[in-house]
Image (spheres, grey):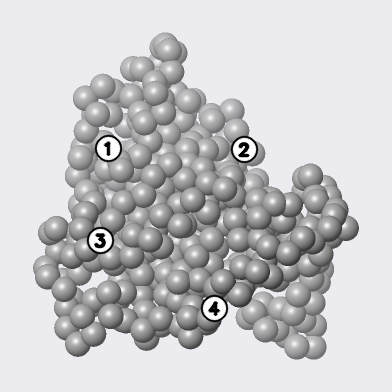
Amino acid sequence: MSPVSASSRLNKNLHQHYRSLPQGDVAQVTYVWIDGSGETLRCKTRTLECEPQGIEDLPEWNFDGSSTYQADTSNSDMHLVPVRMFRDPFALDPNKLVLCEVLKFNRQPAETNLRVRCRKVMEDVQDLKVWFGMEQEYTLLGVDGHPFDWPQNGFPGRQGPYYCGVGADRAYGRDIVECHYKACLYAGIKVVGTNAEVMPSQWEFQVGPGEGLDVADQLWMARFLLHRVCEDFGVVASLDPKPITGDWNGAGCHTNVSTEASRCIRGDTHTHTHTNTQISYIHSFTAGVADRGASVRIPRQVGLQGWGYFEDRRPAANCDPYAVTEVIVRTCFLGCPGGGDSPENSEPVDKMSPAPPVIFHI
């Protein structure tokens, strides 16, 4: 059994006593942002005189960027600009969690603030009603970096029984997964499912479908909640794409994509136009129906019925969802160099009744 953190062994009943004390009319608001690594989240909390009802009620704040890899000590103040507000599943109502963009001293986006560019691109294709659904895989580790509940000096049985598995010898850490699921729902995040993955101690949750920045914002906050829930349990959630060397599965963030046209019955022309793109890849690009070894998978039912979505299987677990959704839109819909044709050049599709929003494999 991998060791858990010392803080997780503190008296939780004592903690709950203080958490349940009345706080009057004030609200605790926790500001969350992406630090200079582009992967790690930071947070700090302030008190507001009343419960905020919307983003307009949240003041900008600042932080020491020299301690987050985002500024020099001599010019360290960075701006926190609230962009999305969520209910706080830890401190409960009326307290809030707030996702923030980070701006430099000159009000320009910080280097790891990819949301600004993503927002502009999504505005350019808003008429297409592009939907995304993102499947976040992660691995539970002990504080020593060893996979949670693996034998301390060895390995569990070979992969095979763990995917969507049930039982103490197959599902490692389900309590954490279920608590995170409920925390996301309480916060207002559109988590639509979860499952155990192929490697033991590896899990997945899915966020979406949604347009534009919506899914990327929600995925970042869902990651924050995952880390906070794991903190309470004394374990670590890793988004490392290959946390364990050898013949063990890695972790990805498969991204499902559709447009209003492809979601309509007989939208197959649009689906294939968007997936048969010729862009630069590290090695090669492939696409196939029901092929999980391909760069892009067209789900079996989409291939049969001719409408729906495609799944880009290339994004790694630690990807920035703003960057992923932006580059997919640029490639498939904006005719960028090396990208696909714009939708206007595709054959017209009869717009019949919209298809059900089947956007995930779960």
Answer with the quarter of the image where residue 349 lies: top left
| Residue holding disc 3 | 171
Q: Is residue 27 left or right of residue 235?
A: right
Q: Earlier in the sequence, mark 1 or mark 2?
A: 2
Residue type, numbered disc 3: Ala
| Residue holding disc 2 | 124
**In the image, what residue occupies the spot 49% across and 78% down?**
8
Q: Nearer the viewer, mark 1 or mark 3?
A: 3
Residue type, numbered disc 2: Asp
- For disc 3, the neighbor class at 10 Å (few under 14, some 14 to 19, many from 20) is many
| Residue holding disc 4 | 11
- For disc 1, the neighbor class at 10 Å (few under 14, some 14 to 19, many from 20) is many
Q: Nearer the viewer, mark 3 or mark 2?
A: 3
> Do the residues under discs 1 and 4 have CB atoms within 8 angstroms?
no
Q: Nearer the viewer, mark 1 or mark 4?
A: 4
| Residue holding disc 1 | 298
Q: Secondary structure at mark 1?
A: strand
- For disc 4, the neighbor class at 10 Å (few under 14, some 14 to 19, many from 20) is few
> Do the residues under discs 3 and 2 have CB atoms within 8 angstroms?
no
Q: Which x, y percent locates residue 214?
A: 58, 44
Q: Secondary structure at mark 4?
A: loop
Closest to the observer, 306 or 146: 146
Q: Earlier in the sequence, mark 1 or mark 3?
A: 3
Q: How many labels were placed on the picture?
A: 4
Q: Secondary structure at mark 3?
A: loop
How many angstroms separate mark 4 from mark 3 (CA)?
27 Å
Q: Which x, y percent locates residue 257?
A: 42, 39
**In the image, what residue occupies the spot 38% across and 36% down?**
359
